[in-house]
Image (cartoon, rainbow, N blue to C red):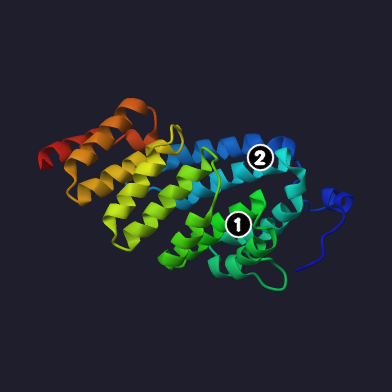
Amino acid sequence: MSELKNPQEEQATTNPLEGLDNVENELNRSAEFVEKNIKPLAIGIVAVVAVVLAIFLYRSFILAPKEQEAARSLYKAENLFARDSFNLALNGDENVTGFLEIIKEYGSTDAGEVAKAYAGLCYKGMGEYEKAIQYLKGFDNNDKMLTPTIKGAIGDCYLELKDINKAIDFYKKAASADNEFVTPVYLHRMGETCLKAGKTSEALKAFEELKKKYPNSSVTMDADKFIELAKASK
């Protein structure tokens, strides 16, 4: 990994913390973009998680300056993750500190916790769902946006492993957060999964709650269709 430049040099060149005054606005716009463009039947969980992780890291930069060294180590790995270079983002090379090494070096920091989430998502992207669950469950934080998003990602992994009941349980945990950005996504996913599993009453409840509490969410657009389908399947 290349040596860190001193703070003044980084601010003058490629400091990932440069322009923090504008970061929050950019993240908010990103969140709005994802929300408006999520397809109800093909929800992009990676996009959701990426936005939420970015917001969480921004808070760490502002509220805990001592986290900056760990956060800088995440910067290149995050870029690789965004390009779906999961193996390289996870393990790193001579130029990039991978998420696994960041966990080892900075596991007690907020950035180290975020690295656990990213590591889990890398394993998920590589189809190694059991390892993904291990790292995602290792994430320990009570952030009201990030925590339910990680619960939802765990649900996705269980769904891939054909463990429908555990998938539904984690979707329920994710949907229990009262969050206009995250909750509608997982209510919809829980409803679909319940419907496919023949749990029509639970599916109906999920879609009715989605329609009632989050009528303006883009994922609510097809709620009526699923409500009728659930009723017809009872």
* Residue at disc 1, secondary structure: helix
Percent of width and height locating residue 129: 41, 64
* Residue at disc 2, secondary structure: helix
Residue at x 51%, y 37% (from the top left corner): 144
Describe residue 85's horizontal placement relative to residue 132 as left or right: right
For residue 226, above or below residue 46? above
Camera-side residue: 100 or 186? 100
Percent of width and height locating residue 58: 66, 42
Query: At label 1, which amino acid type do we have?
Result: Ala
For residue 214, above or below residue 194? above
Identify residue for label 2: 59
Residue at x 46%, y 66% (from the top left corner): 131
Label for residue 152? none
Percent of width and height locating residue 193: 27, 49
* 10 Å crowding of disc 1: few (<14), some (14-19), many (20+): many
Q: Earlier in the sequence, mark 2 or mark 1?
A: 2
Alpha carbon separation for disc pair 2 and 1: 15 Å
Describe residue 55's horizontal placement relative to residue 61 as left or right: left
Query: At label 2, which amino acid type do we have?
Result: Arg
Percent of width and height locating residue 89: 60, 65
Q: The C terminus lies in which quarter of the figure?
A: top left
Identify residue for label 1: 115
Residue 44 visible? The answer is: no
Residue at x 60%, y 39% (from the top left corner): 27
* 10 Å crowding of disc 2: few (<14), some (14-19), many (20+): some
Residue 67 visible? The answer is: yes
Camera-side residue: 60 or 75? 60
For residue 20, above or below residue 7? above
